[in-house]
Image (tube, helix red, strand yellow):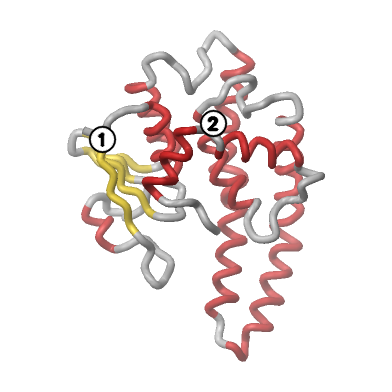
Amino acid sequence: MLHLHHLENSRSFRILWLLEELNVDYQLTCYQRNKAFRAPESLKKIHPLGHTPILEVNDQALIESGFIIEYLLKHYDTEQQFKPADDNEAAWEAYTFWLHFAEASIMPLLVMRLVFTKVVEKSPRLIRPVSKSIRKQVENNMINTSLTKMLLMMEDRLQDNHWFAGTEFSAADIQMHFAVAAANAGEGLDRIKYANIIIWLKRCQEREAFKRAEAKGGRIQF
């Protein structure tokens, strides 16, 4: 039995979505964040790091969304629906690149942006103008330029491809979705400048498995 421990508004939604795409039996336990916007301490009883996603398989606790995705595809994607075949070199390279790009490149920038937003929110009123100024400098000097370059690269990729690996939906799209949804939070991405990204987001969210995952694990909100 597969047992997914899912934290609301977190990257563990990826695994919930993939499990629905694979149409396999699994147990789901959902958790809410505490007042500090962190995962509850109870998760440390399942894995010492206390992070989600955690997928229990035969009493073994697996962590890290990329690893869990690869594990599930190896053992449950019997028809190889969600990962290009090795002999399809172009699709395999694109799939592998975007699968890793999500966590290695774009998510660190988005997490940094979130952290500084939370710092401003939690700052005492008297020093909040200072914390806002620091956040603005960090965003302008360290985040925005790099993030724009990445978004433009993604926009270009989706110009001639419905999905990140090419013509077919894959687990790379599942891995990328959370990052793109985070980038689209707040005021949202420019719908003209990033039209292909916006269309891709809609394609993802129209999938029946995505809708089932939302119904079970909650809608992602930033």
Task: Name the residue furthest right.
Answer: 192
Label 1, label 2: how many angstroms apart (C-alpha)?
Answer: 21 Å
Q: Nearer the viewer, residue 16 or 107?
A: 16
In the image, is residue 105 above or below residue 145?
Answer: above
Q: Which amino acid does label 2 sit on?
A: Ala
The residue wearing badge 1 is 2
In the image, is residue 4 above or below residue 203?
Answer: below
Please identify the quarter of the rendering in which residue 3 is found: top left
Residue 120: give x, y in percent of width and height: 60, 76
Task: Name the residue furthest left.
Answer: 59
Q: Is mark 1 on a helix, strand or loop?
A: strand
- Residue appearing at x 56%, y 25% in the figure: 169
Q: What residue type is labelled 1?
A: Leu
In the image, is residue 6 above or below residue 158?
Answer: below
Q: Earlier in the sequence, mark 1 or mark 2?
A: 1
Q: How crowded is mark 2: few (under 14 residues within 10 Å), some or many (20 or more)?
A: many
Image quarter where the N terminus lies is top left
The number of numbered badges drawn on the structure is 2
Task: Name the residue furthest bottom.
Answer: 126
- Residue appearing at x 42%, y 39% in the figure: 212
Q: Nearer the viewer, residue 2 or 200?
A: 200
Image quarter where the C terminus lies is bottom right
- Residue appearing at x 76%, y 29% in the figure: 159
Task: Name the residue furthest top.
Answer: 87
